Image: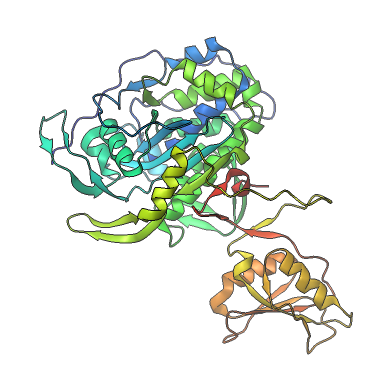
Amino acid sequence: MPTPQRPQRPPHPRTTPPRRRAPQGTRPVRPRKQDERPRWGMRVATGLSVLVLGAGGIGHAVVSSLEGGIGRVDPFKDMKNRPQGGHGTNLLLVGTDGRDTITKAEKKKYKLGGAPCHCTDTMMLVHLSADRQRASVVSLPRDSYAEMPAHTDRTTGKHHESHPVKLNAAYAEGGPTLTVRTVEDMTGVKVDHYLEVDFTSFMKTVDAVGGVKICTARPMKDSYTGLNLPAGTHELDGGQALQYVRSRHVDVASDLGRMERQQKFVAALIKQATGSGVLLNPVRFQQVAASALGSVRADTGFGTEQMLALGKAMKDFGPASAEFASVPIGNPSFLVKGIGSTVQWDAKKSKKLFQALREDKPLAPAKPKPAAGPEQPPATLVDVAPKEVRVQVYNGTPKDGLGGTVDEALRATGFTTNEAPLNGELRDLKRTLVEYDPRWDRSAKSLATALPGSELKAVKGQGPQMKVTVGSDFTKVQRVKAESRQTGEFSTVTGDEVVCP
């Protein structure tokens, strides 16, 4: 099947921020070559930043001057039989995989070689609540099984009947219009606005806000993208952020795991943009907005007035205001003849998810109010959730009741203890000991993190239950939490749960 030509962007004036000395404490933005066409999958973060950056009360003239940098597309032209609109506003954020405008140096550094398929690499459906107090971000797996609507190729004039595809092929066959039609058919959600952004804009936006902080519970290495991060907290610049959100080979979850990392990054970007003073400094705002909008394509209805209205309404927006979910999966390896392995949605659960969006309902469960008392220290990220770790506590000291104290503290931070601590064989142990079966080494590391200074000892054949013998060095149980805390009916997480403390 011939690949239709992609619509060309009309020429437009570039808005170049005035050269000024960077404020003290901010990093200078390295100039990068601007692209003319959209590329790469994680431009969605830039699309969200467009909404967030309007929240600082920046004047109409500034936003109007930046609008000239937005490429325009009409994804809704001649569309019929569309879903009925609900409450709130729905945006489809799209990233494509085009590589023709990336410099050779960038291709080599960030391992962006290979022939593009001119299809969407990342897709998110964002619902902004009618009261502008909440954004619900739903990731749509690019390999989702989809039924392409019947359509006529605008380039060749050839008519295509409805046929099965992977969701990311809709862009290749029919560009933004067919992409919107396919998403609306699959979700029943009417798309009000369309945003498509590229990797250059993404990297420059990250640099312009001063980098983004990401925390990892374990080392992350992907030879395909060049990502190489040890466990801990990292300040990512634009290029490193590009590697982080593109990586698919850091765990067995592949593309589904990558979507979680992309959501986590979007939350971190929102935190940085709303908490770093960008929105209160007109010069920095213009620098960041010009970077974000330099390569964006949007529908013709998303202009200055719409951006300002959204920005003013979302002036108090922050990470806790955003909730992230992925479409519930029924079969992650649904084989389709002629297509291969696809991701099949759970029909019942996904229907309820999109119904919640149409009805403007939150996806995340209501959070309980924090108990009165002293503020709890931030939890340390671990690889395995405490509730998945079984523990038997022993007292290795002559201090009566110490085993019960530790058992209770571990249970309070989420570990599954036997609630029946015992006396250890040794009663003069100096250093707390965690004994574990090597097959459950990740669980053991999570437990040891909660017991600062403890010693790990592998014991073959011990089974899944951890054995903790408390030593005289014990001082406290450190609060820990899993890197991903998706909860509720739709496996939803809010932004404040995934950003670094």
Q: Residue 321: horizontal and vertical position, in percent?
A: 60, 38
Q: Is residue 451 visible?
A: no
Is residue 241 rendered to the left or right of residue 341?
Answer: right
Q: Quadrant of the rendered structure where residue 8 is?
A: top left
Colour scheme employed for the rendering of this structure:
rainbow
Q: Residue 38: horizontal and vertical position, in percent?
A: 35, 31
Residue drawn 77% across and 75% down?
Answer: 432
Residue 447 higher or lower than 39, as above or below:
below
User: Which quadrant is home to the N terminus?
Assistant: top left
Number of labels in the image equals 0
Residue 65 higher or lower than 121, as above or below:
above
* Residue situated furthest bottom in the rendering: 425
Residue 479 higher or lower than 501, as above or below:
below
Residue drawn 47% across and 36% down?
Answer: 127
Is residue 223 rendered to the left or right of residue 282?
Answer: left
Q: Is residue 443 visible?
A: yes
Is residue 358 rendered to the left or right of residue 472?
Answer: left
* Residue situated furthest right in the rendering: 399
* Residue situated furthest top in the rendering: 61
Residue drawn 40% across and 50% down?
Answer: 350
Q: Residue 158: horizontal and vertical position, in percent?
A: 10, 34
Q: Quadrant of the rendered structure where residue 105 is?
A: top left
Please state which of residues 445 and 179 is positioned toward the viewer in this rendering: 179
Q: Residue 92: horizontal and vertical position, in percent?
A: 39, 34
Please state which of residues 169 and 469 is positioned toward the viewer in this rendering: 169
